[in-house]
Amino acid sequence: MTSLTQKQFAWLKASLFAIALLPFLRLVVATFTDQLGANPVEFITRNTGDWTLYLLCIALAVTPMRKLSGWTWLAKLRRMVGLFVFFYALLHFITFLWFDHGFDAIAMLADVIKRPFITVGFVAFLLLVAMAATSTNAIIKRMGAKNWQRLHRSVYVVAALGILHFWWMKAAKNDFEQPLLFGAIVAALLLMRVVWYCAAKAKKNAAATLSSSSTR
Amino acid sequence: MLIKHSANGIDLPYGSEITPREVFESRRSFIKKIAAGSIASTALLEMASREAFAQTPGAQKLAAKLNPAYGTVEKRTAFKDATTYNNFYEFGTDKSDPAQTAGSLRPRPWTVTIEGEIKKPMVLDIDALLKLAPLEERIYRLRCVEGWSMVIPWVGYSMAELIRKVEPTGNAKFVEFTTLADKSQMPGLRSPVLQWPYTEGLRLDEAMHPLTLIGLGMYGEVLPNQNGAPVRIVVPWKYGFKSAKSIVKIRFVSEQPKTAWNISAPSEYGFYSNVNPEVDHPRWSQASERRIGEDGLFTKKRKTLMFNGYNDVASLYKGMDLKKFY
């Protein structure tokens, strides 16, 4: 598993693509077979929101998994997972704009401004739009790796806002179990990065002192 | 079991000769037909048969004559929707939870303690409650604070009937309702979402208003567990959470009682909680609503009416600023 042939990787990627599409296909099938329950809009809103968060957690888990397993090819799947995060966030947003506001953009924006939990969700969505729009190789080249990376680090902001959005929504019903779970997962994934960052820095410092002392 | 259930439950009396249950049955058989012909037949069949509804085993009919004063031309919500889409946190916070878990509730034997500022405190069992006044069927709109609504044919009688029997003293200004809180029957109590037991309250004049109903059944049957069996309160001009379910205690008090949602989030859920399109919930607008089973994905939401359309009650709030007393 440490290294895959090109063919194996292509198969893996295609299967993951298909799997990530399943929740969407399920929604489509359920819509046309009247299986969305008593309140279809609520069902779709929650389902697309949930999947945005699931995939966001998976996207944030790619780097830790790569480091822990040594499977470098995992990094090459990250963009696709990120784009699926955007895809489900987009469906979530469209549900809000279409089914809640009947494509009345003014009413939708009024809602965004008036209600903080929607405001943070909307900001997170705009960041995802920016990341999705700059996800092609050509644009990465044009932006320069440094700038591109700076922009795409906003995924951490998206994670924080996304969980706050969910937290605030659930706060209306005093029900924090799920937001807490997502919060804990994301916190763990971020904490691993902090630990690695600190360890790398300490190593670098140690190497620097070592090399400076040896040249003396 | 489903088939047994429909055999004794489908022939509803009086005003309850409604199609939704049949529509639901036919939809279910339709699913089964599709399922039988498909590759994934076993999985789908299992899904269709697993769907729980009407937790009360062998639901009992509850005959009642429609009170025409409380009828409506509006389409009634399908029995299936009204019994599978519930907010009853004692059985879980998901709206599909109560239909699946409320089977553990034992609605019989059941007693309701009536106490406080009254001349005749009493403990009534469910049979006594059923006989306390003639049962009538009333079709009420139910507006949830979450922005959806239903139309439900309840069976019961005005709470005023009960209040007159217990003779409130001059000190009685409010009525407090307490829901059962028994961990062995209600799995949702394990999570501290709300302060248990669930309590709700009304001003005495609100409780005395003829619209305020002691609910003992719906759709011509005794209340399903997930809808607040065996006895609940129905206050159609207030948001749904004011209508306490599975009541074990009714207390008459001189001070405004503390109520569950008000304790949990006072800025979001007031004591009055009258349906009011002009007073938004902080997280969402209350100007419009989605009627369950009617307003589909592509339908525009309908406008919410002041007092849920029950304008009779306006006189109860004369001179009150309803933005302040939300």
Image (cartoon, rainbow, N blue to C red):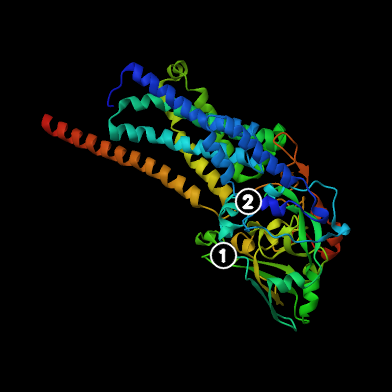
Give me the C-alpha separation between circle 1 and circle 2.
Answer: 27 Å
Q: Answer above or below: position of B129 versus B13.
A: below
Q: Residues within 10 Å of mark 2 (few under 14, many from 20)?
A: many
Which residue: 66% across, 44% down? A38
Which residue: 64% across, 62% down? B262
Residue type indicated by callout 1: Gln
Q: Is residue A91 visible?
A: no
Give the side of residue A18 with respect to residue B145, left or right: left
Residue B244 drawn at (x, y percent): 67, 63
Q: Residue furthest bottom?
A: B119
List the residue tagged with mark 1.
B195
Asked if both marks, 1 and 2, belong to the same chain, the answer given is yes
Task: Name the quadrant containing residue B271.
Answer: bottom right
Q: Nearer the viewer, residue B96 or B43?
A: B43
SS at mark 1 in the image: loop
The disc numbered 1 marks a residue on which chain? B
Q: Is residue B157 visible?
A: yes
Q: Nearer the viewer, residue A216 or A100?
A: A100
Tell me the number on the disc at residue A45: none
Residue A166 drawn at (x, y percent): 54, 45
- Name the quarter where the C terminus of chain B is drawn: bottom right
Mark 1 and mark 2 lie on one chain; the one further toward the N terminus is 2
The disc numbered 2 marks a residue on which chain? B
Residue type indicated by callout 2: Phe
Q: Nearer the viewer, residue A110 or B208?
A: B208
Task: Name the quadrant containing residue B30.
Answer: top right
List the residue tagged with mark 2.
B53
Task: Name the quadrant containing residue B315.
Answer: bottom right
